[in-house]
Amino acid sequence: METVIGFTAIAVALLIGLGALGVGIGMGLLGGRFLEGAARQPELAPMLQTKMFIVVALLDAVAMIGVGIGLFFAFANPFIAQLQNATAPAVGG
């Protein structure tokens, strides 16, 4: 059972860490492209800014979903219950 808990902790760390890394890279690319677009055509900056904030919100949602799934596995791990059911002796047999 300790192995399942250990592997779950590693999986949660990878899930949250790689999700945050991906969102950080995505926001960096998005911000850079927004600045390029605003510098090329300043009259379109308000429209580009609105679209940029919508995409930033979607990127943040991806990170929050990853954190939620990670916390679910950390605190309500379904794999431990399955392991306990599989290794429990048969009762009333």
Image (spheres, rainbow, N blue to C red):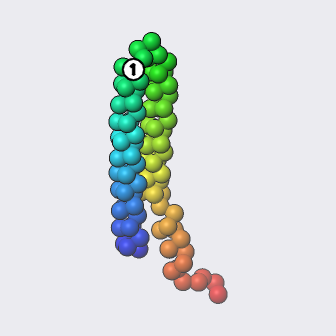
Mark 1 is surrounded, within 10 Å at the Cα level, by few (under 14), some (14 to 19) or many (20 or more) other residues, namely few
- Point out residue 68 in the picture as x, y percentages from the top left corner: 46, 47
Residue 20 in view here: no
Question: Residue flagged by tag 1: what amino acid is it?
Answer: Arg
- The front one of 32 and 14 is 32
Residue at the farthest front position: 40
- The front one of 44 and 62 is 44
- Point out residue 53 in the picture as x, y percentages from the top left corner: 46, 26
Q: Is residue 43 above or below residue 72?
A: above
Q: Is residue 38 above or below residue 60?
A: above
Q: Which residue is mark 1?
A: 40
**Residue drawn at the location 43% of the way across and 53% of the way down:** 70
**Residue drawn at the location 50% of the way across and 25% of the way down:** 51
- Point out residue 67 in the picture as x, y percentages from the top left corner: 43, 47
**Residue drawn at the location 44% of the way across and 37% of the way down:** 60
Left or right relative to 76: residue 17: left
